[in-house]
Image (spheres, rainbow, N blue to C red):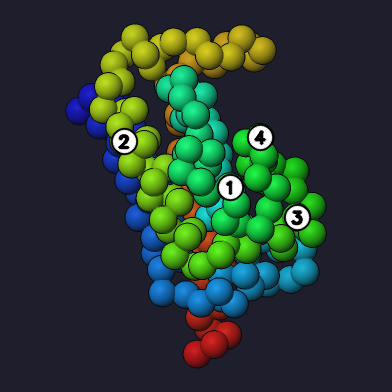
Amino acid sequence: MESKEILTDAFARVHQTVETAVNGLTSEQVAFRPDPDANSIAWLAWHLTRVQDDHLAEIAGREQEWIEGGWRNRFGTDPDRANTGFGHTSQQVAAVIPDAVETLAAYHDAVYRRTLEYLDGVDSAELGRIIDRSYDPPVSVGVRLVSVVNDNLQHAGQARYVRGIVERATA
């Protein structure tokens, strides 16, 4: 199995987990927060997608889907390309409310498709390309992609956990 096949599978698992966390819920359910400072499903799905979009766009040398796809005005939050949710306050988390539940899955789906397009052309030389020398050792494309998968899977799992809470509370 080639490295790009492993990465493609990993991002497919993220995509599947996001879909199962979001699909079929109401606006109220995706906005639910287990306590006043907890993250909602909406914020978790939005944030992990923003991180994937931001990092993959930088690696691929292209504009973010957030900008090109017109998603930035559909989530009730700061539309700035640098806004990925990192360091958000409780109030900023609460403000991430998509214009429709389907928007969460649709934005993630669009970013996922772009990720697959990029991964289709990846080879060993690309995975070894250094993209950040501020760390010791410097960060390669391959290391950054694994970092994105790791972050995404953690947040997707959190979203599934919150969904379980929501479903038990409304059963």
Query: What amino acid type should be assigned to the residue bearing mark 1?
Result: Arg
Whichever of callouts 1 and 3 sits on the residue coming sooner in the sequence is 1
The quarter of the image holding the N terminus is top left
C-beta proximity under 8 Å, tags 4 and 3: no
Mark 1 or mark 3: which is in front?
1
Residue under label 4: 82
Q: How many marks?
A: 4
Task: Give the SS element for disc 1.
Answer: helix
Badge 1 local density, few (<14 within 10 Å), some, or many (20+)?
A: some
Badge 3 local density, few (<14 within 10 Å), some, or many (20+)?
A: some
C-beta proximity under 8 Å, tags 2 and 1: no
Counting from the top left corner in percent of width and height, residue 32 is at 63, 73
Which label was assigned to residue 14?
none
Residue under label 2: 116
Q: Is residue 137 left or right of residue 119?
A: right
In the rendered image, the residue lying farthest to the left is: 1
Q: CA distance from mark 1 to mark 4?
A: 11 Å
Which residue appears at 75% of the width and 55% of the height?
A: 92
Whichever of callouts 2 and 1 sits on the residue coming sooner in the sequence is 1
Query: What amino acid type should be assigned to the residue bearing mark 2?
Result: Leu
Task: Give the SS element for disc 3.
Answer: helix
Query: What amino acid type should be assigned to the residue bearing mark 3?
Result: Gln
Counting from the top left corner in percent of width and height, residue 149 is at 46, 38
Comparing 75 with 58, the one in front is 75
In the rendered image, the residue lying farthest to the bottom is: 171
Badge 4 local density, few (<14 within 10 Å), some, or many (20+)?
A: few
Residue under label 1: 72
Whichever of callouts 4 and 2 sits on the residue coming sooner in the sequence is 4
Residue under label 3: 92
Badge 2 local density, few (<14 within 10 Å), some, or many (20+)?
A: some
Which residue appears at 27% of the width and 22% of the height?
A: 121
Whichever of callouts 3 and 2 sits on the residue coming sooner in the sequence is 3
